[in-house]
Amino acid sequence: MDPPQERPEFPSETPTDQRLQGSETPPVQRLHRSETPPVRPQAAGGEGAAAATASGGDFYAIITVFFLFIVISSFVAFLSSSTLSNLTILHQVPEGHVGVYWRGGALLKTITEPGFHLKMPLITQFEPIQVTLQTDQVRDIPCGTKGGVMINFEKIEVVNRLHKDYVYETLLNYGVQYDNTWIYDKIHHEINQFCSAHSLQQVYIDMFDQIDEKMKDSLQGDCTRYAPGIEIISVRVTKPTIPEIIRHNFVQMEQERTNVLISIEKQKVAEKEAETRKKMAITEAEKNAHVSKILMQQKLMEKDSARMQEEIENQMYLAREKSLADANFYRLTKEAEANKLKLTPEYLELRFIESIANNSKIFFGNKVPNMVFDQRLLGNFLQSVAKNVVAEAEL
């Protein structure tokens, strides 16, 4: 610090100095009442040192206030909401959560429902625990396959829920961050176990659709055994990131597989078309056969109708002929009966005489008596014959 310099003398007094000398009031008091302090020449010495000291004190005060403001702002910024809640008596448990309390670091069995509750500040600590569905996202999971290829799962989502009845047991055994133990760390472990037992082809393509269920079953099995309050709802695994060269090979392989599938589908389409044409031809043939069968049945029915008509006509003819024969038989029978009644000896004798009378030829000679009998003998003979005929008729 420079030594104080002597104050130079002025040749004459200023009007301000005269007013100060002639006034009974000290200069300092006048300065407080005046609106603007008098302009004095700057000079080294005691007054300059006093002015420097005053300005330095103001600067230090400003620095102190600014520093305190920064400290208070930093304290408020880094003070967590849980710490603030521990300083209050009234606290709120949000919906879908339950309130859990610690006193002196020991977990209390008190579990509160959503709403406003009271606690002892600074002594009892409070933490809300979610008991509804929540999704934990596990990111950046590196693993090595069976063939030694390193792949990375960018994100795996685990939908889980902590049952309200098991909140105390779960927090007592595994703390508030229980999901770090049974979800985040477990997912890392299971993914690495799965990748180390399978090849890249299986992990990336063949068995990728099974990873979700395998992770869910594995997590739920261990949680059921060691932390029964944790329920695993579902696991969603995104496609892992593989080296670019291998990915390019997979893309080419998928393109070739797509082309093969297209060829197979074209072949199936051609087979379907051929089968369709075959079915159409079979249908057409069946239709023609059905039509032919119907026409044949029609012709057979026509023949049957003609046959039945002919049979009816034959039956009619037979019945007619039979009727004529019966009539003729009846006529002859009646004529025979009439003849039997008519063949008497007298009638026969009459007919014999008429026949002889009508005969124009007369024979003469020695043999004639052998031919012509006595009329009486002939009549007796005819009479005996007639009796025999009548007797046979009566029998």
Image (cartoon, grey):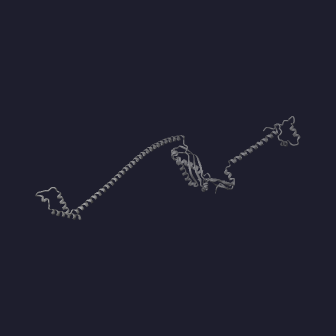
Quadrant of the image containing the C terminus: bottom left
Q: Which residue lies furthest to the left in this view?
A: 366
Of 388 and 40, which appears nearest the observer? 388
- Residue 45, horizontal then vertical, whole percent: 82, 38
Residue at coordinates 32% horizontally, 55% vertically from top-left?
316
Residue 331 appears anywhere in the view: yes
- Residue 271, horizontal then vertical, whole percent: 44, 44
- Residue 165, horizontal then vertical, whole percent: 60, 57
Indicate the quadrant where residue 347 lies.
Answer: bottom left
Q: Which residue lies furthest to the top in this view?
A: 11
Quadrant of the image containing the N terminus: top right
- Residue 295, horizontal then vertical, whole percent: 38, 48
Of 180 and 166, which appears nearest the observer? 166
Q: How many marks?
A: 0
Q: In this view, does 58 lie to the left or right of 381?
A: right
Residue 108 appears anywhere in the view: no
Of 248 and 255, which appears nearest the observer? 255
Of 293 and 21, which appears nearest the observer? 293
Q: In this view, does 197 lie to the left or right of 59?
A: left
